Structures are given as structure tokens and as C-alpha cells.
Image (tube, grey):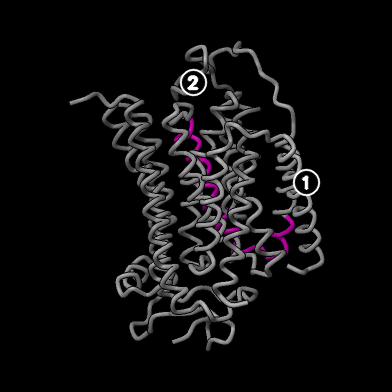
């Protein structure tokens, strides 16, 4: 097996970051195209903060909306992929430092991973997804409460 | 203005911000929030959520290129990320406690400081620093490629730099920006890391710092897909184009102009925050 030199680790990290961004941007673009097809003519209003519907706040909800091809769900899933990209880079770094037998940096990297995962695991901790909710479609000012058409 | 027109406008603004931001090295993310909040009347919380997503995309894209060039110091980055991610969490929690007006004022001050910081002269310093015990233990001393071969460097004042990185992380989580100006102060001036290494390593750190607070923003419903989509795609396209022509562009005048824009936006944000318009 080839040695895990710093150069090789850098190459893997660079490739991982690049493809993470490309994949996420592609997903957002696809969701965006669907969004304009169905909601392009609605009037957006972001001047009043209402917060996103619960389906678009938690990983499980976002995945469910994306699988059902809800445009906003697809975009949000792409954004989730984007957030996961640097996290995957940190997770890979743990493995890389372990292969290099650099204990100090395995510990350092695990600390960073723990903090980031703690931030992501807060998802859903303060939101409950009611099972009967319909998928959100278009955000617009004339939508019924809270912020989307049913 | 319908959704399609609004998105196109936001996307074009994003292309311009990303293009100028990467050409001048000031970063496009820093003008996204003021543009959305001041000109398009977007609530500052939605604006910050969209900006946070955008800087993950641009910094990861830029870092992918830098990493392969060999300037980025992974060990310095990983160690300082402990401070920036914890700071980012603190900033994200603060964002829910602080009023939008106060956020606007803090944002304005950071913009003014960034414009000042990026226009200071950057003296080349000789490589005479004594070995620093903390930096030696953390294996931070390294080298970077130059035209005449690898140039070695030493890292100093790690605890002070680490503390300032916590502040940079907090500002990043509170305002949805990369906090490049504070990071340069910490790495360039305090830890005495060579300019090229400190800027590339700082870019490398932005993605994971923003990811830490993005989780909190997402769960709070601050990240709106229909708004983040055009902002993210526009800035990503603009900054990628900017990076392509960076090598052959004369950026001094552009840099001055963009700094003046940042100064004006900063002053406007402070005014809007103080008068309660935001």
C-alpha cells in the first residue's frame, strides 16, 4: 500500500471538496429549475421573517421532500450536501491522521468533528414534524399562513 | 417582481459580488447580507442564512484549488478550527438572542474594519523567528512553494492566535461571513504565518466553520431554499470566474473601488441599525 504522505492527503481533500461543491450545486440547480417551473410567477416576500416550515428544517424532512421531488425540498437537499462537504473533509482527516500515526492530530480533528456534529445534531431537537403536513410549494406574500401554499 | 425576476436579480448581484470578491481577495460573502438586507428588503436573518450557505460553497471551491497547490497548512487549519467551530456555535446561538438592529450595527463595524484591514500595506518579514514550543509540539512549522524552491517558515504566538480565531468564529456564526479580516489579523500579524499560507489556510477553514453554525441556522428555519439558491449559484459562478482571471488582472483600482463599496455598505448598515430601519 502506498504511504499516506501529506501530498496524497491534500490531493484527496482537494478532490473531495471540489466534487462535493459540484454535486451540491447541481442538485440546487435542478431543484431551482423545478421551482421556477412551478412557482416562477408567484410574488416572493422575504421582508417579514416567518421561519421555514418544519419539513425544511430537519434532515429526515428534507430527504423526504427531496425524494418526493418537491422543488424546495430538492434545493434544501442540495444545501444539505453542501454543508456535509466540509464535514466529510474533517471526517476524512481523522482517518488520514490515524494512517499517518499522528495521535495529536487525530485528537484535534476528532474535537472539530464533535463540535460540528453537535451543531448539526441540533436539527429536530426543537421542532416536531406533524405527520399530516403537506409539502410546502411556493413561498409568496399572498400565501396562507405561515408562508407557503398548501 | 415575481419569483423568477427576483431570483435573476439576486443571482446577478451574486455574480458581481463573487467576481469582485475573488478578484480583490476581499471575499464576496461580506457584501451579500448588506445587498439583500439594504437593497432588496430581505429580513437580515434570511440574508445571513443565505450568506452562510454561500460562503461554504465558495470557500470549499477555492480551497479545493489551493490545497493542490501546496500552500494550505492542514495542521494549522485543523488546530485553529477547534476555536473557529466553537466560536461559530456561540455566534449562531447569539444570533437568536440579539436583535436584528444590533446585528446590523455589529455587521457594519466589521465591514468598516475589513475595508481598513485589507488596504494596509503588508511588509515582507525576514524568517528569523525563534522556534515556538507550542508550534513545535503541534508540528505547525512547514514550508511553501516559491519560484526558487520550498521556503520554510515558523509559527509564533499560537495561544493568542487561537483566542482571536475564537472571535473570528463567533463573528462568522453571528453574521454569516467568513471573517477573513480577523483571521488575517490572527494568522498573518500575530502568528506570523506567511501571507500566501495564511490566506489559503483561512479559506480552507471557512467551510467547516460555517458548517458548524449552518446546522443551527437550518434547524431554526433561517435557511430559505428559494432565496439561498440564486445567491449561492450566482456567487459561486462569479467567484469561479474571478479566480480564473486573477493571475492576469490589475486589481489595485478594483480593490480601492470595492473597499469603498464595503465602507459605504458598512456605514449604511450602522445607520439603519441605529435608526431601527433594520
Residue at the image point whose x is 80% and y is 54% from the top = B267
Instruction: Tally the numbered discs.
Output: 2
Label 2 secondary element: strand
Q: Horizontal placement of B114 versus B247: left or right? A: right
Reading the image, the residue beneath label 2 is: B144
Quadrant for the N terminus of chain A, please. top left
Residue at the image point whose x is 40% and y is 60% from the top = A78
Residue B3 within the magenta-colored segment of the rendering: no
Residue A108 falls in which quadrant of the image?
Answer: top left
Give the farthest residue toward the left. A1
Residue at the image point whose x is 49% and y is 57% from the top = B214
Reading the image, the residue beneath label 1 is: B260
Which callout, 1 or 2, points at the residue further toward the start of the chain? 2
Instruction: Point out residue A140 in the picture as x, y percentages from the top left corner.
Output: 55, 81
Quadrant for the C terminus of chain A, please. bottom left
**Region rendered in magenta:** B76-105
Residue at the image point whose x is 54% and y is 37% from the top = B202
Residue B99 within the magenta-colored segment of the rendering: yes
Q: Does residue B206 sit above or below A122 in this rendering?
A: above
- Crowd around label 1: few <14 · some 14–19 · many ≥20 (10 Å): some
In the rendered image, is residue B167 in sight? no
Amino acid at each position: 500500500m502506498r504511504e499516506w504522505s501529506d501530498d496524497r492527503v491534500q490531493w484527496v481533500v482537494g478532490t473531495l471538496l471540489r466534487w462535493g461543491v459540484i454535486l451540491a450545486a447541481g442538485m440546487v440547480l435542478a431543484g431551482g429549475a423545478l421551482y421556477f417551473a412551478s412557482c416562477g410567477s408567484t410574488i416572493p416576500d422575504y421582508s417579514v421573517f416567518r421561519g421555514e416550515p418544519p419539513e425544511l428544517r430537519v434532515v429526515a424532512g428534507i430527504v423526504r421532500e427531496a425524494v418526493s421531488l418537491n422543488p424546495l425540498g430538492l434545493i434544501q437537499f442540495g444545501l444539505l450536501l453542501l454543508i456535509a462537504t466540509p464535514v466529510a473533509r474533517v471526517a476524512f482527516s481523522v482517518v488520514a491522521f490515524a494512517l499517518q500515526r499522528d495521535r495529536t492530530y487525530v485528537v484535534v480533528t476528532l474535537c472539530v468533528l464533535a463540535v460540528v456534529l453537535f451543531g448539526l445534531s441540533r436539527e429536530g431537537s426543537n421542532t416536531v414534524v406533524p405527520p399530516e403536513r403537506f409539502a410546502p410549494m411556493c413561498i409568496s406574500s399572498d400565501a396562507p399562513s405561515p408562508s407557503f401554499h398548501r | 417582481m415575481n419569483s423568477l425576476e427576483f431570483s435573476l436579480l439576486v443571482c446577478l448581484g451574486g455574480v458581481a459580488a463573487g467576481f469582485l470578491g475573488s478578484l480583490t481577495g476581499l471575499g464576496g460573502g461580506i457584501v451579500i447580507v448588506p445587498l439583500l438586507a439594504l437593497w432588496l428588503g430581505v429580513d437580515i436573518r434570511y440574508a445571513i442564512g443565505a450568506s452562510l450557505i454561500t460562503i461554504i460553497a465558495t470557500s470549499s471551491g477555492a480551497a479545493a484549488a489551493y490545497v493542490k497547490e501546496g500552500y494550505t497548512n492542514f495542521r494549522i487549519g485543523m488546530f485553529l478550527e477547534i476555536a473557529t467551530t466553537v466560536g461559530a456555535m456561540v455566534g449562531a446561538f447569539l444570533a437568536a438572542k440579539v436583535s436584528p438592529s444590533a446585528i446590523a450595527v455589529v455587521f457594519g463595524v466589521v465591514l468598516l474594519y475589513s475595508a481598513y484591514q485589507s488596504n494596509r500595506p503588508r511588509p515582507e518579514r525576514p524568517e528569523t523567528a525563534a522556534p515556538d514550543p507550542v508550534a513545535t509540539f503541534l508540528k505547525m512549522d512547514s514550508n511553501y512553494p516559491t519560484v526558487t524552491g520550498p521556503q520554510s517558515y515558523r509559527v509564533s504566538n499560537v495561544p493568542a492566535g487561537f483566542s482571536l480565531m475564537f472571535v473570528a468564529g463567533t463573528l462568522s456564526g453571528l453574521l454569516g461571513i467568513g471573517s477573513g479580516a480577523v483571521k488575517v489579523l490572527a494568522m498573518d500579524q500575530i502568528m506570523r504565518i506567511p501571507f500566501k499560507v495564511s490566506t489559503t489556510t483561512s479559506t480552507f477553514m471557512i467551510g467547516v466553520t460555517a458548517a458548524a453554525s449552518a446546522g443551527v441556522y437550518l434547524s431554526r428555519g433561517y435557511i430559505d431554499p428559494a432565496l439561498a439558491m440564486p445567491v449561492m449559484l450566482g456567487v459561486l459562478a462569479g467567484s469561479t470566474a474571478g479566480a480564473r482571471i486573477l493571475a492576469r488582472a490589475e486589481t489595485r483600482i478594483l480593490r480601492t473601488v470595492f473597499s469603498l463599496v464595503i465602507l459605504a455598505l458598512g456605514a449604511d448598515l450602522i445607520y439603519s441599525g441605529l435608526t431601527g430601519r433594520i
